Image: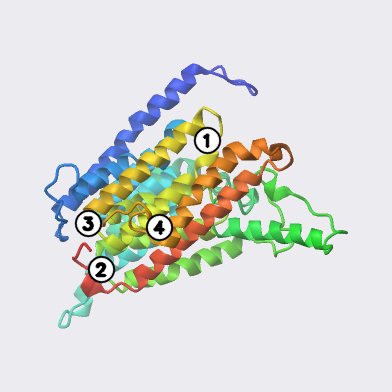
Amino acid sequence: MLDIKRLNYDSWQTVYFQRFSVILTDLVYAYGAYECCKYLMKSSLRKSSKWGSQWASPSAVLALLLLGNAGLLMVDHIHFQYNGFLFGIMLISLSRMLQDQYLASSFWFAVLLNLKHIFLYVSPVYFIYLLRNYCFQKRYPGTPFKPWFLQSLRQLVKLGLVVGLVFLVSFGPFIAMGEIKQVFSRLFPFKRGLSHAYWAPNFWALYNAADKAILVIGKKAGYFQSANFSAAMTGGLVQEYEHSVLPSIMPRTTFIFVFLSILPALLKLFMAPKNPLHFVRCLVLCAFGSFMFGWHVHEKAVLLMIVPLSLLAVVWKKEAEVYLLLATVGHYSLFPLLFTTFEIPLKALLLVMHSMYSYISLSNLFHIPRKLSLVPFVSRLESLYLMGLLPLFLYENIFHVLMGFDKRYPFLPLMMTSSYCAIGITYCWLKYYWHFVTMSEVIHKRKAY
């Protein structure tokens, strides 16, 4: 296992270690799911009529949605990563926040940040919610300013100590050795380019596809014949590149887009104190914003929206609608990670099983009648879009090779998957954002649907 070679490294001992370590660390994810289900059972939200059912209650459905998440099974147990362990810590932090255990939630989120800095994108949600609900709580009329301010300051110091100690333990050795600059250069490698080798299905995937389409059409129309254009974006390499026709995107541009995309949600959260479910909603939207407009986003980051949205999907009908569409498209967008012939039926089976369970259980939970002509919960147009995944799958895995395009256009299936899924994920983002910002506090604070 430790006899490492540069090329053609092959070790079954390593494979066994990887597989069993993923299974073992998934116990953290299972515990996080348990804590969220426990909160749901003890909360004062209006219960579904199915609450007494052993397998059809909201908490039971949530447990199966989380533990049977098709994306995590594909990315961790087939592709091999430790995302389940990380999302388990996130669920523990979320459950503590829902229970108003602010310091415990902050501790676990600080641990999470030091394990994987991708969660930095949702840190503004923690900052705003803790500042509003723990540090500087509402000052009621008649409350003297000075005691209120001193109490708020004490809370702020306690919070800072908890978070600061976690970061000190993590970064302290690197600071002592004078290697902190090297750490940050590794954490934020801006020279990897706007998009990953396989484009994450976000706004920039559509932007890249538009750039390619304009170039192809322009060449056929005779506009770009004398220009020398490269195919860097579709070369499958992780590197910086420039767009052929559209303006090239710099890191600062993506930061501005991300900030503007999450700002309305953060303002809404700040104006709605003591609403922990709004905290989860805002977290989902911040994850959406970073996924849609972030720099060098990985395709697996779609799970950062799907996993926490599972909690809301079993409580609110509108959020169940978004979850079902997002989970189906988001999990499908992970298919290119598993590209061997053996893995094709496995990933298809995982997606079908998770999607079928999600649609059936949530439609039963909210008493939605099922029709053969339509997918439950979604409109006719949304149903047609979801059905379009089938011909896309068949083309990528069968017809692309049969038509002889695999040699000439090897990146085409990836680009088609990324662009098609980006349309659905963008739609889910806009639909959910509108749902959140137009939510009435009086109507939605306690009702389930």
Residue 425, how many percent across, how many down? 47, 57
Q: Residue at x 20, y 48 (%)?
A: 59
Q: CA distance from mark 4 to mark 1?
A: 31 Å
- The answer to whether mark 4 and mark 1 are in CB contact below 8 A is no
Of callouts 3 and 4, which one flags the residue occurring earlier in the amino acid sequence? 4
Numbered label attached to residue 338: 1
Residue 437, how many percent across, how many down? 36, 72
Q: Which residue is mark 4?
A: 123
Q: Is residue 280 above or below residue 1?
A: below
Q: Residues within 10 Å of mark 2 (few under 14, many from 20)?
A: some
User: Mark 1 or mark 2, which is nearer to you?
Assistant: 1
Q: CA distance from mark 3 to mark 4?
A: 36 Å
Residue 325, how many percent across, how many down? 40, 55
In this view of the protein, can residue 290 be seen by the observer? no
Q: Quadrant of residue 208?
A: bottom right
User: Mark 4 or mark 1, which is nearer to you?
Assistant: 1
Three-letter code for the amino acid on which mark 2 is drawn: Ser
